[in-house]
Amino acid sequence: MDHGENSHSYSRPAVWASFHRFVMVVLQVLRLLKSMRRLCIDPAFSNNINGPIYTGRPVGGDPGSTLNLDLVDCRTENLVKYGSEASLKVEIVALEKEAFRKATSWPDGKSLIRGDPHVNLKDGSVSVSHISFKHTRVPMKKRELRLGARAVYPCDIGARIMEAVTESFFVIDRRSIPKSKRPLKLDDQVWNLQTIGKGGAFHDRLLKENIKTVRDFLTHYFLNREKLLKILGRHMQVKKLDAAVNLAKSKLDLKRYMYPSAHLHENPQVVFTDVGELIGVFHQKGQFVSVERLTQTQKASGMEVVKRAFHDGHQNFKALLDDDSFKMLCSCSSPNKAIDLDGSNGFSSEAYNIPTDAKQLQPVPNDANYMPSTSSVVNNYCDYTNQVNSFDSDDNDFNYQALPANIWDYI
């Protein structure tokens, strides 16, 4: 009897000890599995960089070249969106092509990356398209580099994360970009145009006539090309001038405007860009005619209306056309598709907030640009004629404000 009691008393601690050992083994296995899972997590760039990359330009600046950094499970190749590792802090570095050592600028030895190279992952991903290489006064020689990404430690994830590296690409000083490939804006200096060298004879002639920007140059070209040719002198060939303007147009995202003529019931409305290029006319019958289909007389009449639009202080008479509205307007080019403009199509001026009272028109500021933006954007431009008919310029007293003299001297 005593032997049974002793056996029972000693068996209970042994069972608990065995259970404790079993639990510890299970926990160790779980830790090992978790560690193995985390060791298979690697950052990876979404795609390689399409070189060459010019100094001062973002690596993802071109359309379709967005560069992201993703945290990927190397076993399943799925994006890791959860856990502490999904919000890591990562440093972007420039690496030499062969040695994979950190690339520095010469001669100061500083990083080539412009701005803060540290980014934080959000849900396992972050965009690094903003990364660019420094542009300094000292020209940089052509270099073949890579971009690398490494986790910033310490981080509470229990494992070391490997580095991500892109394929090699060339970094070139942007001073070496030919003019034909440089991006262009309307507010850029006029010497950025093809055939207009900085500090050259053409540049000096233009500055004397107060033509300083690309916008000034293009506006003079479309409103009075003969006068612009006279300013540039006999050494400027017409073909070269036309080629320079066409190249500039291909790089610019020009806005389109619609403007009614003085006698709306007799003359059509003109459609033109913000540098004065005539695109076409819109007739009362709801038909849009492109400039290619106009006769020389019609083109001349249309340009007179465009010049009046540039000189006009009636900002509300200029309607800004977005891409969708311009496509809708072009769909009216066929007589069979002409849209009824008598208001029976279901659209009204109230639906588009078109002012029908002269009191609603905003005054032109004293420093108004020669292409002021409209204060009313029309959404259905095939119905715009109805809205403009509600104005009677002869019955309203408007204060016209002349545009800068540097334009109107050449019209």
Image: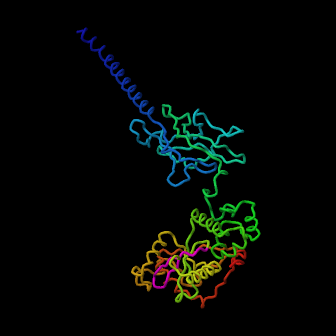
Residue 410 occupies quadrant: bottom right
Residue drawn at the location 67% of the way across and 60% of the way down:
192
For the view shown, which residue lies furthest in the left direction? 1
Residue 10 occupies quadrant: top left
- Residue 30: where, in percent of width, then height? 38, 29
* Most foreground residue, 285 or 238: 238
Position of the N terminus, as image quadrant, is: top left
**Would you place residue 26 above or below residue 165 in this image?**
above
| Magenta segment boundaries in residue numbering | 276-290
- Residue 193: where, in percent of width, then height? 66, 62
* Most foreground residue, 325 or 387: 325
Residue drawn at the location 59% of the way across and 44% of the way down:
170
- Residue 174: where, in percent of width, then height? 65, 50
174 within the magenta span: no
Position of the C terminus, as image quadrant, is: bottom right
**Would you place residue 297 above or below residue 51 in this image?**
below
